[in-house]
Image (cartoon, coloured by chain):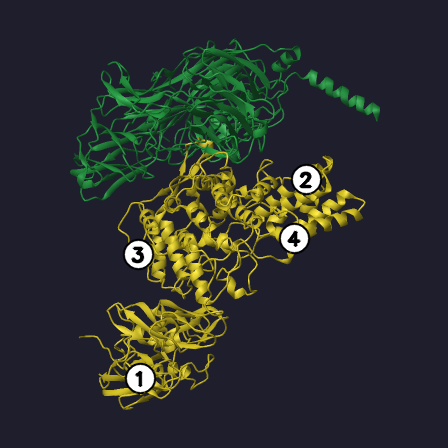
Amino acid sequence: MRRCFLVLMLSLIVGSSAVPVSAKTFYPMIARTSPAAVQAGASMDCEVVAEHGWYGPTKVLITGSGVTGEVLPPKTKADESATKSRGETITIRFTAVSDALPGLRDFRVMTARGPSTLGQIVVVRSPILREEGVNNSIDKAQAVSAPVTICGAIESNEDVDVFKFQIAEPKSLVFHLHGQRLLQKLGPVAYHSDPMLMLRNSAGTVLASNDNFFGSDPLLSYRFEKPGDYFLEVRDVRYAGYRDWTYSLEIHDRPLVLQALPAVVAPGSSVTAKLAGFNLPTDASFNLQFPNDTPTGIHWVDVGRINGQPSEPLVPVLVTKMPLVAELPANNDAPEKAQAISLPAGITGVLESPDDVDGFAFEAKKGDRLTFKILAQVLGSPVDANLRILNDKGDVLIENDDASDKTGNADCRNEVLFPDSRIADWTVPQDGRFVVEVRDTHLRGGERFTYFLEARPRSPGLHLEIDTDKTILAPGTSSPAFVRVFREEGLTGQVRLSVDGLPPGVTAVCGEVPADGQDACIFLTAAENAPPGICANLRVIAEAIDAENNGNKITAVAVPYQELRRDGGARYMTPVEMHTVGVADVLDLKRVRANETKLALKPGEKRTVQVTLERSAGFTEPVTLTAIHSQHVWVFGRCLPAGVTVEENESKLRLTGNDVQGTIVLNVAKDAKPSPPRLTPLMANVAINFSLKMIYTGDPVEVSIVAP
Amino acid sequence: MSRLRWLIASVVLMNSVAAFADVRFEMTPAKVVFEGEFSQTQLLVRERISTETERVADLTRVATYESSDPRVVSVDVRGRVRSQGNGRAEIKVSVNGATQTIPVEVTGFDRPTTPRFDEDVMPVLAKFGCAAGACHAAQYGKGGFKLSVFGFAPDADHLAIVRDQQGRRINTVDPNQSLLVLKATGAVAHGGGKRIEPGSVAHATLVAWIAGGTPGPQRDPSRVTGLEIQPTRRIGDGVFSQQLRVVAAYSDGRQRDVTELAKFDSLNDAVTKVSDQGLVETIRPGQGGAMVRFQGQAASVPVLVPFGPPSELAGWNNDNLIDRHIGAKFRELGLTPAKRCDDATFLRRACLDVIGTVPSVDETRAFLASTDSQKRQKLVDRLLGLTGDPTQDIYGNAYAAYWSLKWADLLRSNSKTLGDQGMWAMHNWLQNVFRNNMPFDKFVTELITARGSLKDHGPTNFFQAFNTPDTRSEAVAQIFLGVRVQCAKCHHHPYETISQEDYYRLAGYFARVGLKVNFSSGVRHEAGEIVVLGKGESTHPRTGQVLPPAPLHGPPSPPSFDRRKPLADWIVASDNPFFARNVVNRYWFHLLGRGLVDPVDDLRATNPPSHPELLDELAADFRQHGYDVKHLLKTILNSQTYQLDSRPPRPSNDEARFYTSYNVKRIAAEPLLDALDVVTGVTTKFPKLPVGVRAIELPDGEYEHDLLTTFGKPKREGVCECDRSREPNLAQALHITNSETLITKLAHAQGRIAKLLAANTSHDSIVEEFYLATLNRFPSSEERQACTELFRETSDPRTFYEDLLWSLLNSKQFLLIH
C-alpha cells in the first residue's frame, strides 16, 4: 500500500513537471482586482486575479489618459514559476497622475497567451484604505475617517462590512460605491453583486439607505446634524456574496455633479449651465463653452472646483451645430397647444413636473423622410423618453419607447434597448401639420428631467461593430474579426473596411460588406517571425457612399464588442473601448488550410471543401469546423453569399483526438442569385467553455455565385 | 305616461305619527296609497315614547288589524296590507283596546297590466330561492334549468325560462299550467319543494307575467338605488321581536315597499334570528340584527340587547375619542369594563403590539421602577420614535421591521413570485415607508401608481405579485378598501351592491399596466420595468362591452394616461367611504385583537361595525392628521380601552366584542421566535441571512422553519389577514413543549442559563431575571418561594434552571399578549 502511494505521488510530481503547460491554451480572464481603486496622484499595488492563469504577463493597456500600469515582478521564485505557468494572481502597480480624471477605467494585460479579458479600476480622489479583518457587525466595525476610499469585497454569502466614522460638526457626506459596475466587463463573473448602503447612528437605528443609484450601485448623501459615531454598512441587497465581488466605496464631502442643465451647446458659443448633484450650493453653475472647431457629439466635461473643492465626476455635454430651439414656458401639453418649430431643429426641453408632455408642431409634406431622436440619459438626465408623432387630428402615427443603439429598431443583435428613444427615417404620410410629443415613459418630471430632441430630415449614417474585443494570434496563425454594419436612415450600398493600429508583424485582409449584406470579415495574420508578446489596439474604419447626398463619403469607426458569458451560458456582447490584437507564443492550432481559395458556385450546387488542421504538439481536444460564426441560434458573423449554407449532415465538422482532416459542404440554394466574390473564413473553433471559443482561420476563400 | 305601474305600491312613506295625540302607539305608514292589482305594504306598529325612539317596543305582531272594506284592501295578522279593488277604505289597528286607523286609497286596480321581468318576476325567483346558488343558480343549474345568481343576468334568465327545453316551462294559453308555476307552487313534483304559496302576490305575479306574453328584460330598466329599512336601529331588553319594513328606491324616483320580496338574514345568529318575512327575534344579549338584500342592493339594521341595566362607569375617562365611544357603548349595553392593566402588563403588551419585541430585562426594570405618572405615554412615544431624541428613539428598526412584516404579508412579497431582487426591493421599500412614517395615503398612492424598475423601485413589485388587472383590483379593494370584490368577477356580489360591471370597471384601472425590459444595470442584468401602456381595456365577460374604469359606486373616471392615478386619487380622497375606515380598522385589529368591523377586510353595509360612530370618528381623525399612522397608533395606545386588563369582569365571549377587556392574543410566529432568542440568549440563524437578522426582519415568505410554520407564518400567497393564523392549536402546544428549537436553546453553552451560572449569579437573581425576561414582571413572593423550595430539592442546578425557564416559556403569560 505504502509502495502504491509513493508511485502515485512520484507520477504526479513527474507528470506536473514534464508537461509545462496544457496543450489547450487559454487567454487570462480577469476575475477581480483588489484593491479596485487608485488615487489620483498616487500609485497602488493591486492584486489582479485571472481564471486560467497568467502565463507571463508583460504589458498593461489602460483606457483614457493619466493612468498607467506596470506588472510587478513576482516576489518569490515560486511566484515567478507560477506566473509563468498558471499562477492566478499578479500584482500590477497602477499609477494615476494628480489630474487624472476620476471614474472607471478599463485595462487589460498582455501575456504570453495573448491579451487578457478586461479588468476595471476606479480612479478616485480620496486616499485608499483596505477593508480589514472581521467587520460584520457594529461592535466589530472598522474605523475610518472621511475623506476615504474603502476598497473591500462582499466576499461570501451573508457578508456585511461595517465601517465606523465620527462626525464632529454638522456636515454633509457623499457615499459613492462602485461594485456592480466593476463587474460589468469581467468575463468570468456572470453572477453580479447588487450592493447596498445602510447608514446607522450610534444606537444602530437606520438613518438612510440606498440600493440602486447608478445601475445596481448605491449612492447616499446625508446631512449629519449631530456629532457622534455613525456606522456605514455595505452588503449585497440579497446578502449574497462571492470572492470576486470587490467594491470601491468613496466617502467625501466634495461636490458630486450628476448633470448640467442644460447640457447642450453650439460650438463657438457659451451657455451658463446649472449643475445638479449632491453637496452643491443652490446656485452652482458652470459656463459651457467650446471653440468653433470642436467636433460635434458628446464631450465629457470637468466642471472644476466648486466652493474650493474639486468636483466629480465628469458631466456629459452635447456639442451640436443644429439650430437650437428652447422649449417655451407656455403650456404645450396638448397637441393643439404644441409649440411650433421648423425643421431641422435641436430642441432643448424639460419635463418640468410629473405627467408633463411636451409637444412640438411642424409642417411637412407627403413623402418627406424625417428623423426624431432623443438624447437624455446619455446627457445625465433621468428621462426615459417616449416619442410619438401625431397628425393634426391627434391620431398617433408612430411611437417609440426605447431605441436600439443602432437603427432605432429593436432588431439589434443583443436586443439591448436604450431609453433614449428614436424614430428614424419616418415617411410623412400626407401634407400637413404634425406634432412630435415627448414624455417620460414613467410620467416623471422635475428640474433634472431635461432632454434634447433632434428633429430633422433623415441623414444617412453608419454604425458598425467588431466582434470581439481582442484577437489572439500566434506566429503564423490567422484569426477572423467579424464586422457588422448597421446602415442608418436610408444609407445603401457597399461598405469598405480598413484597419489601422496593427502591431508589427501582423497583417490584415479586409473583406467588404456587400450592398445586400451586413457582415464582413477581417483576416488578421501574424507573420511567422512576429515576436510573441507584442500587442496593439486596432481600429476598424468603414467607408460608404451616400448616394442621396451627392455621393458624400461617410466613415465610421467600429465599436468593439466584448463577449461575455451570461448565467445559463449564452454568449452576450457589450461595447468596450478597445480591440486589442496580440501575438501569443503558442496556440492550440498552428494552421488551418482549405484545399480551395476560390469557389465559384452555381445555384443548386453542393461543393465540398477539404480543411486541414495543424495541431500544436499535444493538443488533442476536439476542434469544430464552420463557415459561419454563431452560437446556438444566434449568428454573429456570416460572410457567405446569400443562399449559401453549410450542409452540416454531409460535412465532417468535428475533429477529435489527432484528427486533422475535415470537410465543409457548401450548399447553394436553387434560387440563389449571382453574387460577386466574398471573402469567407473557413474556421476552426476550439471551445474554451460552454459559450466562448478560440477561432482560427485559414486564408480567405473567395466564394461567389455565378449564373448556371 | 308610458310606463305601466300596475304592480307598484305607491305608498306614502312618511313616518309621521298618526294624528291622535292621546293614543299609546304609532304606525308606519300613516296613509297607504296603492296603484294596481298586486300592491302591498307592511305596516309597523310601535309603542309611542317621546324620547328613546330606538328602545320602543314593536307592536306589529301584537296589534290586530281590520279592513273597513275587504273589497278594496285586505290585511293579515302580520300587518301585511294588499290591494283588492279600486276605492277608499281604512285599516283599523287595535292594541290592547286602543284603536287607530290608517286611510287607504286604491286606484288602477282594474287596468290590465303585465309585470316586468327584471323588476317584478326576477325578484320573486330570487326571494323564493329559485335563483339561489344552491338551486337553479348553481354552476350547472338544477334539473336542466339554470338561472343566474339572484337574477343578475336577466337576458340569459329570460331565455332559460321562456325558450330552453322547447319552451316547456311556459304555457301562455293557460298560464296556471306553466311548469314554472306548477313547480314553484308544488303542484307537481319539484326537487326544491313548494316555494311559493298559491294565491300569493308572488304566484299572481308569475301568472300575470305569463298571461301577458312573457315580456323580456327592458332595455333600460330603472334600477334599485337604495334600500331603507325601518326601523334603522333597535335596542330592547331581553327577548323581543321587531318587524322590519323595507322600502326600495328606484333610479326613476319611485319608492316601493319590498318587504315581501327582500331577503333577510341574521347578522349574528347567536343574538338574533330573522324570518323570511322580516321579523327579527332576539335570542340573548349582544349585538345582532338583520341583513336585507334586494335587487343588487344590501343594507343592514342593528338590533341590540343590553347585557344589563345602563352602567355608570365610575372613573371612566372620556378624554380620548376612543374611550368616549367605547364608554358610550358600555353604558348603552350595560357593560362593565375591566380595570386598567398594571404597568408590567402594559409594557409587555405595548412592546409586542408596536414593535413585535419583548422588552429587555433592563427596560423592564427601568419602566417598573419609574414613578413618573406619564411613563405610559412616554413609553408610547419612545416605541413610536416620537421623542425627537435619538438616544430614546431607539426602536425605529424594530418598528419598521414589524410593520413591514405585516404589510408584506398582504402585498405578497415573496421571492417565489418576485424573485430575490424584487422581494428585497419591496422589503426595503416597506422598511423605508414605516421607518419614515410615510403618510398612509402616500404609501398607497406610491404603491398602486408605481412605475419603473422592479429591482430599483420596490412598490413596482406589487404588479408582479398581482400580475393581472383582475387580481390587482381585487387586491387593492381588499387590502386598502376592505372590500372583497372577488364574488363579482362571476356574478353580482351576493352581499354587496357590487355588480359584475363594477368589478370589471375597477379592473379597468389596471388594464394598461405593462412590463418592459430595462438594461440600466448592463446586459447581464436586465430587469423588468413596470410601464403604462397606450392600449388595454377591461371588458364585460358576458356582454363583451368595453368598460371605462370607474370606482366602486362612482361614475367613470375622466381619461388619464395613467389610469391608476385617478384610482389612487379616489382611494385616498377624504370622502372615500372605505379607505380611512379600513386602515383604521386594520390597525385597531392589530392592537385590540378584533376589528371594529370583523373580519377586518370585509367592510360592507351588511357587516356593520360594532361601534360605527367610533370607526367614523377615528377615520376622520386619521384623515385630519394626514393619514399619520403613528398618530393613530398613539391615539389607540393611550386610550383607556387599550390599557384595560385582559381579565374580563364577567367571563363572556359576547362582551369581548365590545372591548370590555383587552382581547388576549397569541404572540405571532416571528415575535415569538425572537422572544425565545432573547430569553434564552441564543440567536436563530436563518438561511441566506447573517447572524443577527431577527425573525421579524425576515423579508420573505419562503423561510422553512418549524416554529414559524407551526405558529402560522404565512407563505404570502393571499391578501387576507386570515392567511396569518392567529388561532392556538395543539401542534403549537406540542412544538413549544417538545421541539428541538427550545430544548437546544435552553441547553446552549453560550445561552442565558450558561452565562448566569458561569457568572456565579445567585439563585434569587437568576429567578428574578427569568421572570423579567419572560413575563416582564418580578416574580411574586409565592413564586420566589416555590422556586427556592424546588431548587433545594435538586442536585443539578443547571437542569433545574432549564426546567424553570422551560416552564415559564410554556406558560400562557409568556405565549400570549395579554
Q: Which residue is mark 3?
A: B546
Q: Which mark is residue B811?
A: 4
Q: Earlier in the sequence, mark 2 or mark 3?
A: 3
N-term mark: 1 or 2:
1
Q: Secondary structure at mark 2?
A: helix
Per the image, the residue denoted by label 1 is: B82
Label 2 sits on residue: B752
> Do circles 3 and 1 both sit on a common chain?
yes
Q: Is residue A549 left or right of residue A575?
A: left
The hue in which chain A appears in the rendered picture of the protein: green
Kind of residue at badge 3: Val
Q: Do marks 2 and 4 share a subunit?
A: yes
Same subunit, labels 1 and 4: the answer reads: yes
> Closer to the observer: label 3 or label 1?
1
Q: Is residue B650 shown left or right of residue B389? A: right
Kindly identify the residue that appears in the image at 53 percent across and 53 percent down.
B724
> Disc 1 marks which amino acid?
Arg
